[in-house]
Image (cartoon, rainbow, N blue to C red):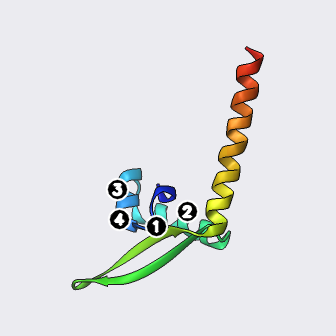
Amino acid sequence: MLASVDSLAFAAVRDALEVSDPVLSKHVKILQEAGYVSMTKAPSGSRIRTWLSLTPAGRAALEGHLAELRRIAALASAEV
């Protein structure tokens, strides 16, 4: 979800994935520790909203993962 945008509201990610705040927070924390995701808090009216973004390292890791999946899929297609 984060690959196609600069940033996305925590609530939007939570709602799209249909998980609770604590579940998403736990996963985001792990991705932050790996250097793949950054979290920013910004005021929005009377509330503070949390925004999630992929870091450059996160984008590179995602691209590498997708490339490997494509390679595996191509191998499977060649064997059929």
Q: Which mark is residue 15?
A: 3
Query: In the displayed structure, does residue 8 sit left or right of residue 32?
Result: left
CB within 8 Å, label 3 to label 4: yes
Q: Nearer the viewer, residue 70 or 33?
A: 70
- Which mark is first along the chain, 2 or 4? 4
The structure residue drawn at horizontal position 35% and vertical position 65%, both measured from the top left corner, is: 11
Rendered position, 32 above or below 62: below
C-alpha gap between disc 4 and disc 2: 14 Å
In the image, which is nearer the foreground, mark 4 or mark 1? 1
Is disc 1 placed on a helix, strand or loop? Answer: loop
The structure residue drawn at horizontal position 42% and vertical position 73%, both measured from the top left corner, is: 51
The structure residue drawn at horizontal position 37% and vertical position 52%, both measured from the top left corner, is: 16
Residue located beneath label 4 in the image:
11
Is disc 4 placed on a helix, strand or loop? Answer: helix
Amino acid type, callout 4:
Ala
In the image, which is nearer the foreground, mark 4 or mark 2? 4
- Which mark is first along the chain, 1 or 2? 1
